[in-house]
Amino acid sequence: SSSSSSFINNCFSQMDGTRRDIEEQIEEVESLISIYEEDKLTVDLEALSLLTDWLRHDVTTTSQTNTHPSNNTNNEDEDDASYTLPPDELSVSVHITSENELTFLLPSNYPSQEPPCIFIRSQQLTRTQCTSLVDRLTAVGKENTGACSLFQLIEEAAQALEEDEYAVSVHDEDNNIHNDHYDDNDGNDESDGKGKHTPHEFTRQFIYFHHIRSKQKRHNIVNFARELQLTGFSVHGKPGLVCVEGMYDNVVEYVGRVRRLHWQRMQCKMTERYPLKKEDNDETIKHMRKFDEMRELVVRGQGPRGYHPNLGDVRAYLEEHHLGHVFEQLFAI
């Protein structure tokens, strides 16, 4: 039918665009490897290898499909067509200085449609400065959409770190993004723009995702939580689920970081908030936690490629941690 032909042609067009993007990503990363010394640059070599193999396989598959288009008349099922998607997303980290590391996560449609996702790990900058620098670099990335921009972004970051705006005084070091503790006054930071005091609450947040597939995103989901002293779990696949619990301001910071990773769909589905009293201490908060750590939950896979998590396993895990009541709300069952 005409609708089937239109769908197939659209798939081919998207595949061609994705293939060109992956080719450019690989070439760009290989150029960075040739420029920077090993102790300055870290590349996810496993993802690089997977994408190189996917590119080689995708070219062969596309050629066969173009020769025998009738074999693909049922591709309107999204999951059946998912084999055409790249298996992972490339990540590249560069040490701008000994105290500042810049990490790029490359979406499958970079550079043609999206800029890279940008993260900064710093032993020098405050949280506000890190956010400011990420916003600045993201703006540069968006301005250069359609062209590879990693080298330009690295140079921009190096230049920015020499400016007065990112100079850190001694008393600012207590607000470092990697400190184990930071007080509620962060909610009064000038960057907030509202001057409101952050609620002194214990918070548990459940976040629903259309899918969680990228290894780098899965790594960030767990590591961001650990950096912010949050506990909970994540489930990768389609759909994906994340639960984090801890102090309110840490949860808000976490959701902001994860949202910047770019998702097809991310929804904060359910929030549990418990006000704390002045006399409540770390021991009180420890007893309020349902989880001892942040971890990726291993569940059985379902579907032809095992891509769908077994929701029965998820339900059992929630019930085990006395959270069975949230399952129906999370998955609308």
Image (tube, rainbow, N blue to C red):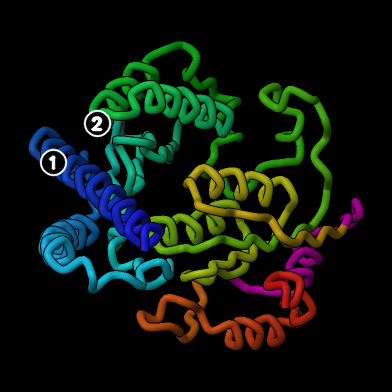
Mark carried by residue 27: 1
- The answer to which of 149 and 6 lies nearer the viewer is 6
Query: Up-down: is 323 above or below 186?
Result: below
Residue 248 visible to the viewer = yes
Query: Up-down: is 94 above or below 277?
Result: above
Check disc 2 and report the residue beneath it: 148
If you read the primary sequence from the N terminus, does the residue marked by circle 2 or circle 1 appear first? 1
Taking the spot 27% from the left edge, 23% from the top edge, the residue there is: 152
Mark carried by residue 47: none
- The answer to which of 251 and 310 lies nearer the viewer is 310
State how far apart marks 2 and 1 are (Cα). 10 Å
x, y (%) of residue 249?
71, 45
Taking the spot 56% from the left edge, 34% from the top edge, the residue there is: 127
- The answer to which of 188 and 307 lies nearer the viewer is 307
Image marks 2 and 1: residues in contact by CB distance under 8 Å: yes
Q: Along the horizontal axis of the image, is 157 left or right of 171?
A: left
Query: Up-down: is 309 above or below 186?
Result: below
x, y (%) of residue 186?
71, 35
State which quadrant residue 183 falls in. Answer: top right
Q: Secondary structure at mark 2?
A: loop
Quadrant occupied by the C terminus: bottom right
Residue 12 in the magenta stretch? The answer is no
Of all residues shown, which one is farthest toward the top? 164
Taking the spot 90% from the left edge, 51% from the top edge, the residue there is: 278
Q: State the extent of the magenta-drawn residues as a range.
A: 275-293
**Amino acid type shown at disc 2:** Cys
x, y (%) of residue 311?
59, 82
Q: Secondary structure at mark 1?
A: helix
Quadrant occupied by the N terminus: bottom left
Residue 295 visible to the viewer = no
Give the class, few, some or many, for how many residues have Cα within 10 Å of label 2's Cα (few <14, many ≥20). Answer: many
